[in-house]
Amino acid sequence: MSCDSNPLYERRIDVVIADQHPWKKVSHRPLWHTLVATNGSKELQKVYLEGGVTSISTPVKRDRLTVFCAYPLSNLFPYGGFYYPGCDLPVVLTQQQGQLASLLLDAYAYNAQAIENLNGRQLADLALKVSLLDTSNLLLDLLNGKLDHESMTLQPKLAVALADLPYGYWVSERAEERSFYFLCNDTHYLEAEGLVERWWNQEQQVCLTLFADLKQQRFYTSLSKAPLW
């Protein structure tokens, strides 16, 4: 993030990542982050935050929305947040706002002006529901400046049964209590939301990724080597 700011059009704020990542609590090793933000010029700014760094001071445009997303290890479930005129400071990045913030960053290059003029208070409320919404319709409505009934209709969660996994303790990347123990010949049941979710097995050093599609009511899983940090 730039160190310089124009006091007439910009102000400097602190951005803070809330809470410890669940994988840090288990491993006792801090995760590094890639912090991505809109910058008021149709481009995204990126900065590397080394392990243990959970805050940064950065300039933002005074009169418009700025979207922030901190991605643990560059691609894990993000911590998101929003600056807008009149918001509380510092800007606190949370997992609850991460999915919506990431969605807006993906669309920023297509219509930066529309995103910068979104209602920040409305986004904070919307972030709590986004994992159960049709994000394609939602994003289209946001860029068009309206939210209709179809884009705000909540989709049912997806029932998922996980089987044939390596034994051990599977730690969810999300701060919610979704971690679980898995024994041989076991089956673990959960309800999935419309997002990508990962679990880390420290004993086996593998990572489970769950892809859930609420619209199609389907899910896919994959196992891979655990990321290093």
Image (cartoon, rainbow, N blue to C red):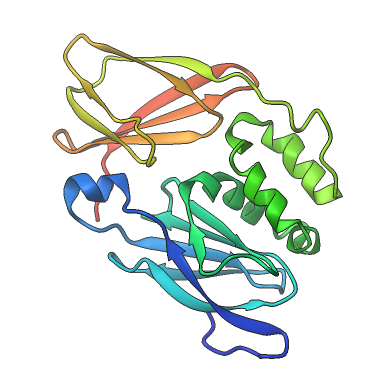
Q: Of residues 228 and 24, which is closer to you in this image? A: 24
Q: Of residues 112 and 61, which is closer to you in this image? A: 61
- Image: 48 above or below 26: below
Q: Quadrant of the C terminus?
A: bottom left
The image quadrant that residue 2 belongs to is bottom right
Residue 53 point in image, percent of width and height = 33, 69
Residue in view at x 63 percent, y 56 percent: 105
Residue in view at x 74 percent, y 32 percent: 152
- Image: 112 above or below 41: above
- Image: 189 above or below 177: above
Residue 54 point in image, percent of width and height = 37, 66
Residue 90 point in image, percent of width and height = 51, 69
Residue 69 appears left or right of 161: right
Residue in view at x 49 percent, y 69 percent: 15
Residue 194 appears left or right of 167: right
Residue 148 point in image, percent of width and height = 84, 35
Determine the residue located farthest toward the top in the rendered image.
185
The image quadrant that residue 216 belongs to is top right
Residue 223 appears left or right of 184: right
Residue in view at x 47 percent, y 47 percent: 95
Q: Of residues 129 and 168, which is closer to you in this image? A: 129
